[in-house]
Image (spheres, rainbow, N blue to C red):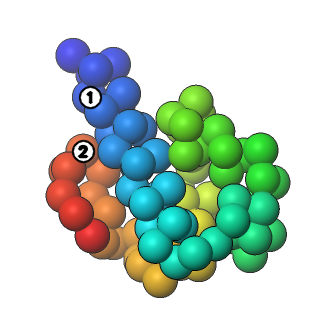
Amino acid sequence: TKEIEMKRRDTWISITVRELRERNRLSRRELARRSGISASALQCLEEGRNHPNLTTLEAVLEELGHELTTVRVGDVREI
């Protein structure tokens, strides 16, 4: 169902953002500051507790050295 697909996408995005942040050796607070979002918003994103809008996701990924186009919504693949 659509709900299951959204949950899978959100889970994948959460895991990907967290792993990229850790690879870049950034704290949540530092990545949030650089991305222009609150640390609590980033925590929610990494824990899959919210649905990030494209602007937020783009800002976070840009700070991690990736473009939004490398993350295709609904397509689980490594970047």
**Residue 32 appearing in the image:** no
Q: Residue at x 27, y 58 (%)?
A: 72
Q: Residues within 10 Å of mark 2 (few under 14, many from 20)?
A: some
Q: Residues within 10 Å of mark 1 (few under 14, many from 20)?
A: few
Q: Is residue 57 left or right of residue 2?
A: right
Quadrant housing residue 29: bottom right
Image location of residue 74, percent across then percent down: 24, 45
Q: Quadrant of the C terminus?
A: bottom left
Image location of residue 8, percent across then percent down: 30, 33
**Residue 42 appearing in the image:** yes
- Classify mark 1: helix, strand or loop: helix
Of 2 and 17, nearer the camera is 17
Q: Is residue 51 left or right of residue 73?
A: right
Q: Which mark is residue 74?
A: 2
In the image, what residue type sits under mark 2? Gly
Of 23 and 67, nearer the camera is 23
Image location of residue 49, percent across then percent down: 58, 30
In the image, what residue type sits under mark 1? Glu
Q: Find disc 1 in the rendering and name its residue.
A: 5
Mark 1 and mark 2: Cα distance apart in space: 7 Å
Q: Residue at x 45, y 67 (%)?
A: 20
The answer to the question of whether label 1 and label 2 lie on touching residues, with beta carbons closer than 8 A, is: yes
Image location of residue 26, percent across then percent down: 64, 72
Q: Residue at x 41, y 38 (%)?
A: 10
